[in-house]
Image (tube, rainbow, N blue to C red):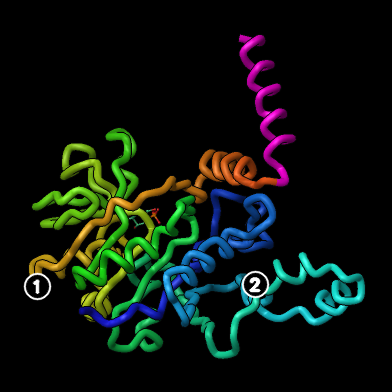
Amino acid sequence: MSKKVTKAVFPVAGLGTRFLPATKSIPKEIMTLVDRPLIQYAIDEARAAGIKEFIFVTSRGKGALEDYFDHAPHIEQELKKKGKDDLLEILKGTNMESGAIAYVRQHKALGLGHAVWCASRLIGNEPFAVILPDDVIAAETPCLQQMVEAHAETGGNMVAAMEVPAEKASAYGLLDVSEDMGSMVRVKGMVEKPKPEDAPSNLAVIGRYILTPKVLRNLNKKQAGAGGEIQLTDAIAQEIAASNDVYGYRFRGQRFDCGSKAGFLQATVAFGLAREELHDEFSQYLQEMAAIQKAAQ
Ligand code: G1P
C-alpha cells in the first residue's frame, strides 16, 4: 500500500491574460462560477479526497486569494446578528485551519513544472496531488477522490485522462498507452503539446495528478521543454523509463476548461442548472433563448 496523499499543490501563478481586463485586478481563480470562485471548487474537491495541507504557488497580484481563505469576522458578526445561519454555513467552507494552508511564490513564469517544483520543500518526501483550478470537473464522486482510491491500488504516478477531439489534442499533454485496462491505462510515453503529426493518441492529461517525490527531483534539473517552459509532463515522463509506474486514469465526470471563455460559459450553464434553487428559472430562460436563436436562423 502506498502512503496516504494528504498534501496538494495548487498552481495559481498564471496571469490569466485570456480573461483580461477582468484579471487586471482580480486573480482568475477568484472569478466565479455561479457564486463560488473557481478556487473553491478545487479546494472542495481536494478536501473530499482527504487532503489536509494546501499549498498555493502564487505570484504578484494574487493577494485576493490569501484574503479569500482568511476568516472574515466582520461579515460573520453581521450574519450572526441577522440570524443568517445558512450564509454562515456557506462561509465555513472558505475557512482554513491555521497552518493548513501555505503560499509560496513563483518568482518567474518558467512553466507548470517549475511552479510545482517551487513547492518542493513544503512537500518533502511523500506522494502529493496537484490540482489545476482551471480544469473544473463535475462528478458524483469528485475526480481526485476517484484517483486517490485508484492510486491506493497502484501507487506510483497517476494523471487524470480524457479522450479529446483529435483537432484539439495538440493543446494538451498526451499519453502513449502501453496497456489499456479500462478506467486505468499504463503509460509508455507522455508528450506535452506535440504537433498533430507527432501525437501518440488523443488521450489527454487533465489537471489532476498524484505524483511521487521523484518527479520533484526530475524537476530539479530545470530542463525546458515544449514552448521553452519547464513542463510537468516531461518530469512525469522521466519516471516511465526510471520505474514504469505512470498511469492515466479515465475519471467519471464532466470536465470544463475554465481557462477558456467558452469553457467558462459552458461551466456556468451546467453548474447553474445543477443548482436546485436556480434550475427552473434558468432552464426556462435557456429554452426561450434557444427558441429565439432557432427562429432567427
Ligand atoms: C496543462 C498541462 C497539460 C494538460 C493541461 C490540462 O497545460 O501542461 O499537460 O493537458 O494543463 O488542462 P495548460 O493548459 O496549462 O497549457
In reply to whether residue 288 is colored magenta, the answer given is yes
- Circle 2 packing at 10 Å, graded few (<14), some (14-19), many (20+), is some
Q: Is residue 160 above or below residue 65?
A: above
User: Residue sitting at 47 percent across and 75 percent down?
Assistant: 57
Gap in angstroms between the C-alphas marked 2 and 1: 40 Å
In reply to whether residue 271 is colored magenta, the answer given is no
> Do the residues bearing badges 2 and 1 touch, measured as CB atoms within 8 Å?
no
Q: Quadrant of the N terminus?
A: bottom left
- Circle 1 packing at 10 Å, graded few (<14), some (14-19), many (20+), is few
In the rendered view, does 46 fall on the left or right side of 218? right
Label 1 element class: helix
Q: Where is residue 33 shown, x and y percent of the image? A: 62, 51
Q: Earlier in the sequence, mark 2 or mark 1?
A: 2
Q: Where is residue 257 shown, x and y percent of the image? A: 47, 47
Does residue 235 appear in this view?
Answer: no
Magenta-colored span: 277-297
Residue position for label 2: 94
User: Residue sitting at 63 percent across and 77 percent down?
Assistant: 66
Does residue 225 appear in this view?
Answer: yes
Circle 1: residue type: Ala
Q: Main secondary structure of the magenta part?
A: helix
Q: Looking at the image, in which quadrant does ligand 1 appear?
A: bottom left
Residue position for label 1: 242
Q: Is residue 214 above or below residue 133?
A: below
Q: Quadrant of the C terminus?
A: top right
Circle 2: residue type: Thr
Label 2 element class: loop
In the rendered view, does 198 fall on the left or right side of 250? left
